[in-house]
Amino acid sequence: MDDLVAVADRFKPSGEVVEVREFGSGLVNATFLVALDSEKEKRFILQRINTAIFPRPERIMGNLGVIAGHVQGRLKAAPPEAGRRWEVPRPLLTEEGGDHWIGPDGSFWRAISFIEGAQTFDTIQDAAHAGEVGHALGTFQNLLSDLPTGKLAATLEGFHVTPRYLAHFDEVMAKNRPRKSPEMDYALKFVAGRREGAGLLEEARDAGKLRLRPIHGDPKVNNVMMDRATGRAVAMIDLDTAGPGLVHYDIGDCLRSGCNPLGEETDRWEAVRFETELCRAVLSGYLPAAGAFLTEEDDEYLCDAVRLIAFELGLRFLTDYLEGDVYFKVKEPEHNLLRALVQFKLTESIESQERAIRDIVGETR
Ligand code: GN1
Ligand code: MG
């Protein structure tokens, strides 16, 4: 703990560090909430970036600076409508003026401002919450829609390119023989039956039908901060994967997360369902906030995107389970297998309701 206080001390905006405690439910980085005895900034977020996963963490910080600057400019020119606020996490600087600090052991630390008066939820609460989650993603993308993608760096090369995850799964399978169980059997059959079509979004991009834009990369429910008083979305946090990408990755991820009321950590995987009424709510919040940049061709791929991103996340969890949990943090040995089953059940539910989802996309546009 003393060490953490010393690290936090390097970033403190004012006052003394009174407490550092673990915070949030992220699966990759180590996150802490730092409390200060200060009148000004009372707390901030301190994180140790997992450099085994993010090999170029300085790119994350570069993007964060570019995004914060751009969005602040846009908000100055056109503030949010009455009754709403919109905030962007800001990087805090060290005394030397750097946006990160590298520890003697090579660990990469950064600090970001805390958004006061707001909270996150790990699972979707109701349709109003779903609408706000959609609104948050649309607002985020809209505020960056005039930022040239060249200004943002890729922090994880090919992050949502599903065929890459299939190739990695094959490599891992070639080296490991999974223990037999009905669940593993289901999971392996599930993947085998969905190899075709995994490259749909990439093919559409290569054919010039979809193009790269600034995206968030990880817009799941608990990355949207909700105002405690008004219940409205106030910020998208965790910008580590923000960069150039297809907006479809974002919409797909937001829907796979926002339309699964049991949440991605449930142990009732067989009961997992994609709720189309929540899908309607997310899209009804998303589309007006996103504004004019979506084309008809974009619409065409929205339904495929949600199916693909749910499948991709399941495949990532399954691969990590087979590889010995080298990527996602786990609380128990079968955790990643269970997470994979949740996403596969969700994918199945999306597949079986494709017609209804396509209709909702049409109706909410
Ligand atoms: C990881 O670490 P966290 O919780 O922000 C992952 C996302 C997954 C998510 C699933 C860099 O995000 O892609 O959708 O877990 N982030 C990375 O909860 O791989
Ligand atoms: Mg994340």
Image (tube, rainbow, N blue to C red):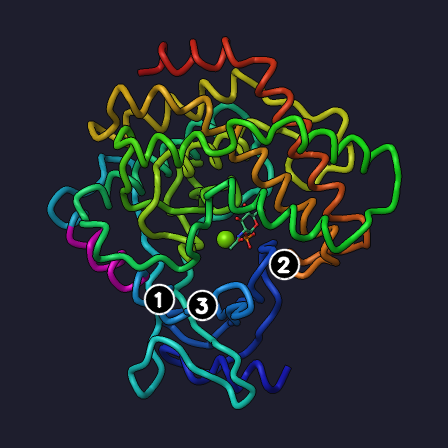
The residue under label 3 is 44
Q: Does 254 appear above or below 359?
A: below
Is 239 rendered above or below residue 179?
Answer: below
* Residue closest to the eye, 48 or 54: 54
Over which residues does the magenta segment extend?
64-73
Question: Dots 1 and 3: beta carbons under 8 Å?
Answer: no
On whether residue 72 falls in the magenta region, the answer is: yes
Task: Give the residue drawn at x 51%, y 40%.
Answer: 162
* View extreme (bottom): residue: 104
Which residue sits at x=46%, y=83%?
A: 102
Q: Which residue is labeled 1 in the image?
A: 59
Residue 31 covered by magenta stretch: no
Q: What residue is at 61 percent from the left and 69 percent from the top?
A: 21
Asked whether mark 2 and ligand 1 are closer than 8 Å, the reply comes as yes
Q: Nearer the viewer, residue 355 or 182?
A: 182
From the Cβ of disc 3, is ligand 1 less than 8 Å away? no
* Distance in Å between CA atoms under marks 1 and 2: 20 Å
Q: Amino acid at mark 3?
A: Phe
Foreground: disc 3 or disc 2: 2
* Residue receiving disc 2: 327
